[in-house]
Amino acid sequence: INDPRAAIEADRAHVWHHMVQHKPFESADPRIMVEGRGMKLWDITGKEHLDAVSGGVWTVNVGYGRERIADAVRDQLVRLNYFAGSAGSIPGAHFAQALIAKMPGLSRVYYANSGSEANEKAFKMVRQIAHKHHGGRKSKILYRDRDYHGTTLACLSAGGQKERNAQYGPFAPDFVEVPHCLEYRAFEQGHGDLSGADYGRAAADAIEAVILREGPDTVGALCLEPVTAGGGVITPPEGYWPRVQEICRKYDILLHIDEVVCGIGRTGTWFGYQHYGVEPDFVTMAKGVASGYAAISCCVTTEAVFEMFKDESDPLGHFRDISTFGGCTSGPAAALENMAIIEEEGLLENTSRMGTRLMGNLHALAERHAVIGDVRGKGLFCGAELVSDRDARTPADEKRVQAVVADCMAQGVIIGASNRSVPGYNNTLCFSPALIATADDIDRITDAVDGALGRVFG
Ligand code: PMP
């Protein structure tokens, strides 16, 4: 098992990798990661990497090699490795309580294994509520252009990343798209004259226009990322969220916030929506919940939604929700330790501080590299959009964007780029280091980008 050549050969022969389009990992030698400590990773060739994307897809929030999480998982596994989620578990009860304490207004936690499954749960509840309480109307679920919600067919049906999704159609019915809220590209939506709160309001009003077009009595929910991740690190414009909340209340539409990326600290608050004073009806989360030490995701909802299912007259009502591994004991055991680490080490504060440094460094790079058209971010979740013409905001050529990622990787720094999902707009470099990042780590990341931009764009 420790023979690197045999592992590489077996990988080449038999492993069907996820995201095969993820260029840097497509090189001649499959880049198998072997070990991690803190912010650092070592691959199968022994090369050291500084990980600026927390495990490739913004997951390992508390860093690698946390013995205390591994111990908690091990202790739980030897005590009780499994019983179906229809029964309770001690870590499951404690983590739900700890989580709800961070989420005023919400009260019930449904456990699953992945972000996709948590989102599916929310989508299914919306459909069930439509049947139970609205005579089958209000079954439509609105999603936003450039947002992403997961790998299942329903999640892809709610996916605003057209190029990637087209191959999977036909999609589940009654998923309807609303426009994105990327201020830098407002001019492409005919809002070139608007900025700040004026644009924020217009972008939210565009959601209302879709609701009115579809008929408010047909729309059950609106599902949004607080900060759009893979679609290009899109931070919401000022004034956007309060107006979104107002629209949802006006038309009795449930607000589902997908915190799979932002949840558990990524943006410097426990949840991304908490920056904007929003009161959601569903919050889904996954990646950072246990930082990749165990598979766990959650769909959290209000007591009001829970009440709608409580007096279930149909005895088979919940039957479809018995998932074998949802609520498995080791997931909440890991999640409890993960949360304790964030609290004890002050990682939310560190995230805000280091996020400010990262944004500052990226803005400084933008002064020297005309190819950086826009810098966006919240906490340790930042992006730099590359353009070939600053005035026209023409997206930079994707191959050159990938060349920057590859150059950084050659320097031993793993960064990301928006994931080839939106035709022509996979031009945003993405940074999401672990919440433990130090000032030196941040500077090393942006130094690598500085060198790479110079070499690739001259
Ligand atoms: N929502 C968002 C915002 C995501 O970024 C992802 C994963 N990249 C998902 C949902 C799906 O989560 P998972 O891969 O755990 O199913």
Image (cartoon, rainbow, N blue to C red):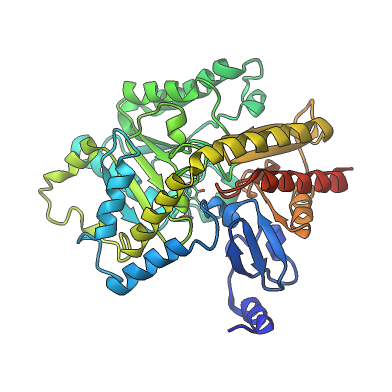
Placement of the N terminus among the 4 image quadrants:
bottom right
Residue 139's image quarter?
top left
**Is 453 left or right of 144, judged from the image as shown?**
right
* 260 to 303, vertically: above or below: below
| Residue 399 percent across, percent down from the top left | 77, 50
* 107 to 156, vertically: above or below: above
**Is 160 left or right of 368, judged from the image as shown?**
left
Front one among 166 and 15: 15
* 112 to 394, vertically: above or below: below
**Is 226 left or right of 188, judged from the image as shown?**
left
| Residue 251 percent across, percent down from the top left | 32, 24
Placement of the C terminus among the 4 image quadrants:
top right
Picture residue at 80% right of the left edge, 43% below the top: 450
| Farthest front residue in view | 344
Q: How many numbered discs sit on the rendered protein?
A: 0
| Residue 262 percent across, percent down from the top left | 49, 42
Front one among 444 and 129: 444
Front one among 172 and 403: 403
| Farthest right residue in view | 458
Picture residue at 55% right of the left edge, 17% below the top: 197
Front one among 167 and 357: 357
**Is 168 left or right of 103, judged from the image as shown?**
right
| Residue 79 percent across, percent down from the top left | 28, 72
Q: Can residue 129 be seen from the camera position used here?
A: yes
Q: Can residue 171 be seen from the camera position used here?
A: no
